[in-house]
Image (cartoon, coloured by chain):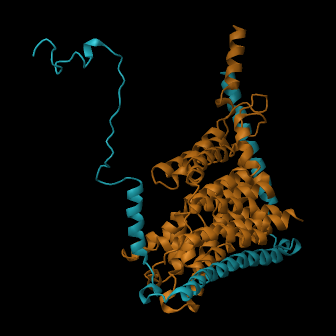
Chain colours: A cyan, B orange
Amino acid sequence: MDTLNMIISDTLESVEDTVAITASNISEITFDLSKLWNSNGIVFTVIGYSVVFIALLLLFIAFKSLTKIISFNLRRKFNKTAEVPTEKKGFDISGDITAAISLALHLHFEEIHDLENTVITIKKIQKTYSPWSSKIYGLRQNPRGIK
Amino acid sequence: MENIVHDIDKFIKFTGFAHMTIGHIIMIIVGLIFIFLAIKKEYEPLLLVPIGFGILIGNMPFFENIGLQLGIYEEGSVLNYLYFGVVKGIYPPLIFLGIGAMTDFSALLSNPKLLLLGAAAQVGIFLTLMAALTLGFTLPQSAAIGIIGGADGPTAIFLASRLAPELIGAIAIAAYSYMALVPLIQPPIIKLLTTKKERLMKMKPPRSVSRREKIIFPIIGLLLTCLISPGGLPLLGMLFFGNILKESGVTKRLSDTASKSLIDIVTIILGVTVGASTQATTFLTPQSIFIFILGAISFMIATAGGVIFAKVMNLFLKEGNKINPMIGAAGVSAVPDSARVAHMMGQKEDPSNYLLMHAMAPNVAGVIGSAVAAGILLSFLMGG
């Protein structure tokens, strides 16, 4: 009983301690706008965000022009050899068709289809030799004595 | 008789009951809520189950600091060794390797302007940084708290491990919680900022992307982003490395390992140790509560930033090229949940409107954007 009382009193003490610590720490946290200026928070924010934006803007420009560069080279190559057929110029597969082809390929490679593949799996089982199961003495052999 | 009583007393002192505090009980309830949300509601179960169970593990009370080496903060314990990867920021780059090997950047490559949405959504990081500063957090601490708005758990852990290791537990838990709660947090904000007409907007189907483009992407991506923001090298380097393993087509085994076994192993260890780091005796502080509040604000601002920027972009785009503003919300990273939210909301308005592919573009751009932001914060604050 004493032990139980001790545990309860310990627990209550720890709860009181936690509440006391929490209350004191909350009173330490204050709202102060001047800290933004004192620690260069605004300058830091503006520069930081601008750099993130510029990095992704550069990526955008790079990939926007990348497509053009690739197609430009192809066009030049085609011009040297032969005229590109008119249908090929506007060759563009729509998203729906791409999705259908992707699904078909996925099903094919993952073998998720309703037809069994044609590989027949016969397992070779090795048995120890015994005259009782030997084909040599089997009934399908013609007995030598009978002609 | 006295000896028996003494032994029983000693035994009781060593049980968890003797050291149970109200804090432990609160944290155990939090852990159970996480597990409930993961199993019943299926909110990010791959993260919430390990984290939720980790919270239970971390909040089993015991006799601390008497050399038993049990707790996550006790040197030499198994959990402490596993937690080393979190504290030193080892796991996040490995997760990024897996993400890179899993992610198809085709949607982004077919419509590169959506990269800007990923940049716009990072506004949450910087505005929250300012809010945290006004509340008395130091600049490095504020930056670590702000990164929660990037909605990228590994990035948040990586940055916190460098800038504010003392806050890593709270920041990691906040980041992962908000990632899991994307389906609850984002829809009201998106709905508030968009009209029905905008939500019904259909986008042009993305063009097909050549293999050459996909291979060039990680190389140019790495060069450009890491030259601007070398601080993000561990994350961006691994992200693009994982992606080239996938897109090269000649390293299928490596790409499979990175995108399946490796990322699964790291996620398990990361989740359970981050959960266990919420030991009530060190975790339950007013600072943690403020971090949670600031994290939520950061996340909301980021969502709003993406949506508003998409609307601004529409002002300059031609009729056929306009963007459904809902996909701007996917710029907050949180792959692929935020893209799924935009898609589901679009489907709700018009079942024939498929936005998932389009939303994946700002979503993966958000991953790059938050890693770049983390790199910049790291370079500025650690470089003096």
Looking at the picture, does residue B317 appear above or below residue B51?
A: below
Quarter containing the C terminus of chain B: bottom right
Residue B203 position in % (x across, y down): 46, 81
Question: Is residue B210 visible to the viewer in this orientation of the structure?
Answer: yes
Residue B269 position in % (x across, y down): 64, 44
Front residue (pair B16, B339): B339
Front residue (pair B213, B30): B213
Residue B95 position in % (x across, y down): 64, 54
Q: Classify residue B125 by image quadrant.
A: bottom right
Q: How many marks?
A: 0
Of all residues, the one furthest to the front in this rendering is: A147
Q: Classify residue B287 by image quadrant.
A: bottom right
Identify the residue shown where x is 35% and y is 32%.
A123
Identify the residue shown where x is 55% and y is 52%.
B256
Question: Is residue B292 visible to the viewer in this orientation of the structure?
Answer: no
Front residue (pair A2, A134): A134
